[in-house]
Amino acid sequence: MSATTIAAASAPAKDAAIAVRLGRRRRVADRLNRVLCVIATLIGLALLASILLTLIVRGAGGLSVSVFTQVTAPPGSGGGLLNAIVGSLIQTALGTAMATPIGLLVGTYLAEYARGSALGTAVRFVSDILLSAPSILIGLFIYELLVQTTGGFSGFAGAVALAVIAIPIVVRTTEDMLRLVPVSLREASFALGAPKWKTVILICFRAARDGVVTGILLSVARIAGETAPLLFTSLGNLNWSVDLARPMASLPVTIYQYAGSAYDEWVQLAWAGALLITAGVLAINIMARLLLRKRG
Amino acid sequence: MSLAATAETGEAPQTRGRGDAIAAALAVAAGLFVLLLLGAILVSLLMGGLPALQQFGSAFLTRAIWNPVTQKFGAAVPIYGTLVTAILALVMAVPLSFGIAVYLTELAPLWLRRPVGIAVELLAAVPSIIFGMWGFFVIAPLMAQYVQPWCIDTLGDLPVIGDLFQGPPFGTGIFTAALILAVMIIPFIAATMRDVFLTVPPVFKESAYGVGCTTSEVMRAIVLPYTRVSVVGGIMLGLGRALGETMAVTFVIGNTNRISTSLFGPGNTIASLIALEFPESQAGSLKLSSLLALGFILFVISFVVLAISRLLLRPRLRA
């Protein structure tokens, strides 16, 4: 009799104690997880900071006027990166010029013409795969397609390889941005009797302009830093050359050749080049984001 | 919605003229061009690799030899290196990416989410050759001086896993390559996870918070079950990226055609082997053909991984 009374009386008290303990344990576990998440984020930010700091510390010392005014030279005789910088600009510009119209067309096809069709689904799928496909294989492909058939490495082949990498980026952003254009705008245009192609060009593209430009900028940033596809296409060139039919230097390939060399002078130039290309790529990226933000 | 559908497909007959026919034909041609591009890449790699595949047969996949003198080539070592570095990179990158994604969607104050998110995305924009130089000049010395000697001393004597932590601390090698790869794929996985976490309807999370759940419990009981498939898709995307990475790996993996039992031993991957050996290959040689066959194998592996990633991600991220 007395035993049951005690049990009955103490039971709620015991449950409350368990509840308090359980609650404390849950809060402690939650706090621990939160701290781990914050630490993970700090590690991520620290990695970016470490890369940028390394580039500035090692690269800033090598930056001088001669980097921009002289071409690459044998070790011990100074030299700069002029031919590599110009080569990168040419190939990136040409690659973008080839990729932009094709990418815009494919993006337009996916957003305006292909909704729901089987071909559209397949094209979107393949374009997404190409977006993440290993860039070195694009280099091998262009080597087979252009270098072996024309009998030599060339700046043009490098630009084509970069274009193949840029196309899926332009496709993705163009499609996404066109999809954001309100249907009512298209309806208004159709109601005025405009044919579809005029609606797409004059209404949809104008409304999505900032987003489409963002996509092009992002593709420029991506291909400007690509090394692997250029190794087998434009090869690199230690002399001054702007001839698209001959091997052409580029900043990433020159950095690759110099960073692995045994000469301190070359390694120093490689760091200067690395700082240049990273600063350029990140600046274009930030610019693209600002452009998109302005639009709201 | 039916109004929208007619407007989008533009079926109103009176507005269809010659201009529309040309525009539609151009658009379809562009779409077909993309399909053709993928087909051309596959066919050109396969055709280029065919002589090597015919010469060696299925032994090409299993033989661990790469000898230009005797003209014997096998793909076992680079395939092994590619898979091991990519999977090891995932093991390191996934927990960190998950933490970052949770911080960006649940924990960070609102004003901080955008700048931190952009910083993580900028990490993805850094060219891969920069990761290579950073890994070779900054991380590898750290590994050689501190991390690897410590691991070899403390873990190297353990009975089963000890073999993984032996050998001289070069700084470069399989483990360092995987570490650099992990840093490179973190932004992709973290950004994808953040995007899929944001698709969870707020009312689900609010009701869980309403009955007294902590943030961890909401993540485990609501967000993760809701987004599980897409989270796996994001991880596969990271895996696809890691498999084909070339420049960063070439700098730090040690570039030796040997399967090493130790994680600190040197090795190679398909991509790094192609980048290194290609300049020394004659056009039309068996070696070049073997490299192209390797490229074909890499393309098939990446294609499968990326295709799975797309199929898992599509329903959530692209309506």
Image: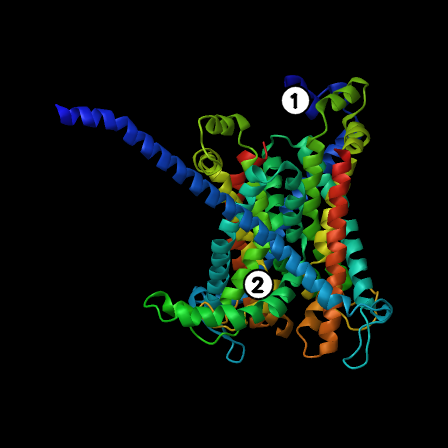
Of the pair A194 and B52, the residue shown nearer to us: A194
Of the pair A55 and A239, the residue shown nearer to us: A55
Q: Provide the residue designation for mark 1.
A: B5
Q: Earlier in the sequence, mark 2 or mark 1?
A: 1
x then y, percent, for residue A196: 76, 27
Q: Residue at x 53, y 69 (%)?
A: B143
Q: Chain of mark 1?
A: B
- Give above or below for A214 relative to A229: above
Number of disc labels? 2
Q: Residues within 10 Å of mark 2 (few under 14, many from 20)?
A: many
- Give above or below for A139 relative to A70: above
Of the pair B171 and A76, the residue shown nearer to us: B171
Q: Provide the residue designation for mark 2.
A: B271
As helix, strand or loop, the secondary structure at mark 2 comes to helix
Q: Chain of mark 2?
A: B
x then y, percent, for residue B178: 52, 61
Q: In screen coordinates, is B42 left or right of A249? A: left
Q: Residues within 10 Å of mark 1 (few under 14, many from 20)?
A: few
Q: Residue at x 37, y 68 (%)?
A: B162
Q: Is residue A63 visible?
A: yes
Q: In screen coordinates, is B58 left or right of A277? A: left
**Amino acid type at image mark 2:** Ala
Q: Residues at badges 2 and 1 in contact (C-beta under 8 Å)?
A: no
x then y, percent, for residue A94: 79, 54
